[in-house]
Structure formats: structure tokens, C-alpha cells
Amino acid sequence: MYMLTRQLSRRLLIIAILLATMLVSPLRAQSNAQPWWQHAIFYEIYPRSFADSNNDGLGDLRGITSKLDYLHTLGVDAIWISPCYPSPQFDFGYDVADYENIDPMYGTLADFDALAREAHKRNIRVIMDFVVNHSSHQHPWFLESKSSRNAPRRDWYIWRDGKGPGLPPNNWESSFGGSAWTFDPTTGQYYYHYFEAEQPDLNWRNPAVEKAMFDVTRFWRKHGVDGFRLDAVDLLFEDPDLKDNPVLPGKNEFGDPQMTDKFNDNLPQVHDELRRLRKVTDANGQVLIGETWTDNIDELKAYYGPHQDEIQLPMDFMFTTVKSLSAPDFRKQIELVESAGGWPVFVISNHDIVRSYTRYADGKNNDQIAKLMAGMYLTLRGTPILYYGEELGMENHDPVRKEDVKDPLGQHGWPEQKGRDGERTPMQWDASRNAGFTQGTPWLPVDPAYTTYNVAAESTNPDSILNFYRRLLAMRHLSPALLDGDYTPIGQNGPNVLAYLRRSGKETILVALNFSNSTQPFDLNSAAQGTIQAKTEVLLSTSAAKDAANGQQHTLLLSPYAVYIARINP
Ligand code: NOJ
């Protein structure tokens, strides 16, 4: 009898555990396949501009929570929220005054918990922006550090004597203009800041700084955070001897001498540190995304780590610097990224760069070009990161007068550098006042195009950019080839058409993209050197390409900027 009761209670226990696993962790359902982040669509939210729940003109966390169903329907699997920590907002949150709380303008920690809970219910992971290189000048660490040369946290930041009266320790420049050193009369020394003076650089050579920052990742794990986007990660270390940077001819947009950041950017120690950080985030079950601006593919390759033990998702920003809509230029960059040996990460827009809609618009085929860009980067091998509003065809809406500029970069660099306000305007939800973003006064003006380009209007238009994104993302989620297949370029020398196969063991998908403003014939068989013998099944194409495909079996006539995606059936 005793044995029987024991067996029964063991069985009940196992059933309870199984049920609990099924109920509490829908996110882990695929854990034995690829890591989740390889199949995920990421979406960057700039919280000031996404959705305002209390009508103070600034977006907030409750606003984001209220839009999770929209994101879920769009096909988003993870949101990266740009900084929402307490901050005096000199750089709109990239100046963090407390790494373990939420700024009241965005809500409370309880609001964050609710957001994470609701996101997870919809299988959407949550990524925090982790501003690792610098804090705010109002962070208690810095306030203590600056208080005295003997302060216990003095060495948490980088303090040095000047070269002489009024002369900073060296020639390093701030990327926001002027010297990277600010004199602090309290202790008669200079402190270093790669960005604004209100953003002092943390001293990562100090183990106490490392420990404090690693603890931050553990704090957010407890609040449901699934990973971090590492801000300005290339800048963690500086040459300890503070050697002057090499000066180049000419001036930059702030009127300062041009120079290379040889001694304060991309030092080898960055990689040692990333390997240590990765151990911590691995133990937390968190993924790392890198803000990895690189000059060449070797630098990008290095961020994956010698044993894939640094950043899982280093963003390739060289992709965003392809200047014109050129099939050969994009083909070349894709091949370079493919050659880096890691899992590629593609972005076309973010809060620091002019929106891709504006970068590539020709004034005539703008919407079709937006679809072309999506048709490309959402079908490549790798993880895409969308930027809010990109799925609507949001464009840059730049300030025209200096007095309207909010971004410090634009305030210092005007008129040559207009700043980043243009790509940070409010999300366009509907055609009502302020695009449905707020009932108050939005912190930045809404782009006038919102009356046409908004979620509500585009949802009812089958040909809208939004519905194109929705179809594309739905298709991608269901396609083994698009999720995991290899990338094989075809028609490699074509000047106008970018075409490739994505092949997994289970499926082959063909993507053909017309990067020109004229109709282009595309002979599938010769481009693929006879490998496409079988019938194609069109999965998604812009209408003109579809019509052409119905003509001859293997010769497509691709209309200007056409997107053609087909399954090759054996
Ligand atoms: C990169 C961020 O993306 C940008 O917005 C910010 O100004 C700098 N880092 C400084 O944190």
C-alpha cells in the first residue's frame, strides 16, 4: 500500500511538472532546435516616440504594453527598448543615472514587470539597451567620483591632469564635438567622455566597475529581461598612456580637426571583456546584441569571438552605409557578412541613422523601394532588427530651424549635422490628431505624411507597406529555408537584379529583386546555371512581377523595384 501511494504521488508529481513546463514556458518550446534569437524578428522601440498612455507628449511603458498585440500580429518575436532608465535626458536616456530602475517619465518598475509579463504571454522577448561605456554625470557613482581625489569611487571614471593650464590631457575628441575632456574645478582634474560632457566614460579597467555592471544584468534577469543591446561597446577601453590620436587633413562637421580614434576605440581589451560578460549573460540565459560600428569585415568578425564566445548578434552597420540602391553593392556586402562566419544581423534603420525609406527614395517609386528593401533584408540568412514605423514606410522628418532641434548632436553640429530628431518622430497609429500617438503635445512633431502612412489606414489597404511586411514575416516564420537555409547568390554579375536561393534540407526558396527603375528580364535557369529545372510556386511578389512570372516558365520580367519570392518545387 505504501509503495502504491509512493508510485502514484511520483506520477502525479511528474504530470504536475510537465504541465507546469507547458504552462509557464511557452518561450522554451523550441529550445532543442536553433537558439531562439536566430529565428526571431527583433523590433527596436524608441520609447519616447512609440505610444503615450498618459498624454504628456512622451511615450511610455504602458503605451508599449498597449501595443503588444499589434507587434504580435506583425510577427515580432523580440522588442529592444532604447534606454528607459532614470536619466536627466541629455542624450535622451543614453545618459543613465540608475541602471536598476525606470525613469518616472516612462512609468515604474512595476510597469516594466507588467510589460515583460504581457510580452512573454505573446512569445515576445524583451531586450534592454545596456549603456555600458558611460553613465550620466548625475549617476551617484559619478557624483561620488568627482567629489574628491580620494573618493572610494574616484577610479570608476577616467580622471587625469591636464597638460598645462587650460590644456586637456590629450587631443581626443568627443563624437558630439569639441574635446573629449572636461575640467572639473572641484578636484582640478579633467574627466573623459567620448560623448557629451554629461556622459562620463566608466573605467572598465577597474574590477569594481565590471562587477557592478555584471550585477546589472542579473538584476534585469529577475525582471524578465532576455538580453541586452550593448551600446557603444567598441569604446569600453582607452589607451592607458593616453597617446594622442593621429590627426588627418581637414575638419569634421563640428569644425574640429579630423582624426582616427586609434587610441580610444576598438582596443583589444574590448574582446577580453566581452568574453567575460558573455559568461555572465549565458548563465542568465540572456542574448547579446552589439552596437558594433566597424570599418571592415574583420572587425565585425572579431565581435563574434574566436569561439563564438562574444556577442551572438553583432549588427552589421556597413550594410546601412551602402549608399545607393545598387544590386552589386548589396550583393558584395551580403557576401562579406556571410564570410564572417557568424550568424548575420541585418538592420536598415535605427534611432541614429536616417530612415531607409528616406535614404533610398527616388521620389517616384518610394513605397515600392521600401518593399524592395524589406524583400531583401527579411529574406537573408540572419536575424533582422526592424525599427519602429519602418513597417509603415515612415520617413525622416528633420527639423528645418536650429531652434527646433532637440538632439544635442544637431544642436552642436547645425546646420551641417541636423541631428537625429528626424528619425525619432512619433509612431503613426492612425489619421487622428498627432497620429494617435498622444492627446497632448508630442515631444517631436509628427511627420505630415501620417494621414496616409499609419497603422489603421495601411491595415485596410492590401497593397500597403504594412501588409507587405506582415505577409513577408508570416512567410518567413513558416519557411524552413528562410529561417535556417544557406544563402547562395545566383546571377552573380547582374548589374540590376539581386537574386539568391535559400536552401535547407526541406525547402528551396528563390528571391529575385529588381534594384533598377526599369523592367528587367531575369532568366532563372541560366542565372542558376541550370539548377532550377522544376516548377516555381510564387509565395509573394509585387503584382507586376507576378504577372510576368505567369508568362514564360523560367523567364521573369521584373517590373521596376519588383520583389519576387518563390518556392522551387522538386
Ligand atoms: C549610441 C546610441 O545609439 C546613440 O543614440 C547615443 O547617442 C550614443 N551611443 C551614446 O550613448
Image (cartoon, rainbow, N blue to C red):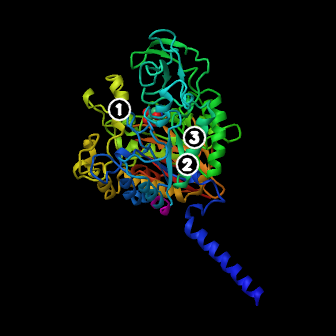
**Does residue 530 appear anywhere in the picture?**
no
- The answer for how far apart the CA atoms under marks 2 and 3 are is 17 Å
- The answer for how far apart the CA atoms under marks 2 and 1 are is 27 Å
* Amino acid marked by disc 2: Gly
Quadrant occupied by the C terminus: bottom right
Say what secondary structure mark 1 lies in. Answer: loop
Provide residue 263's location: percent of width, then percent of height. 58, 20
Name the side, left or right, on which 295 lies relative to 397: right
Q: Which residues are magenta?
A: 118-122
The residue pinned by badge 2 equals: 227
Residue that extends furthest to the bottom in the rendered view of this protein: 1
* Amino acid marked by disc 3: Ala
**Does residue 269 appear anywhere in the picture?**
yes
The residue pinned by badge 1 equals: 407
Say what secondary structure mark 2 lies in. Answer: strand
* Amino acid marked by disc 1: Asp
**Prevailing secondary structure class for the magenta stretch in the rendered image:** helix
Say what secondary structure mark 3 lies in. Answer: helix
Provide residue 441's location: percent of width, then percent of height. 23, 45
- The answer for how far apart the CA atoms under marks 3 and 1 are is 29 Å
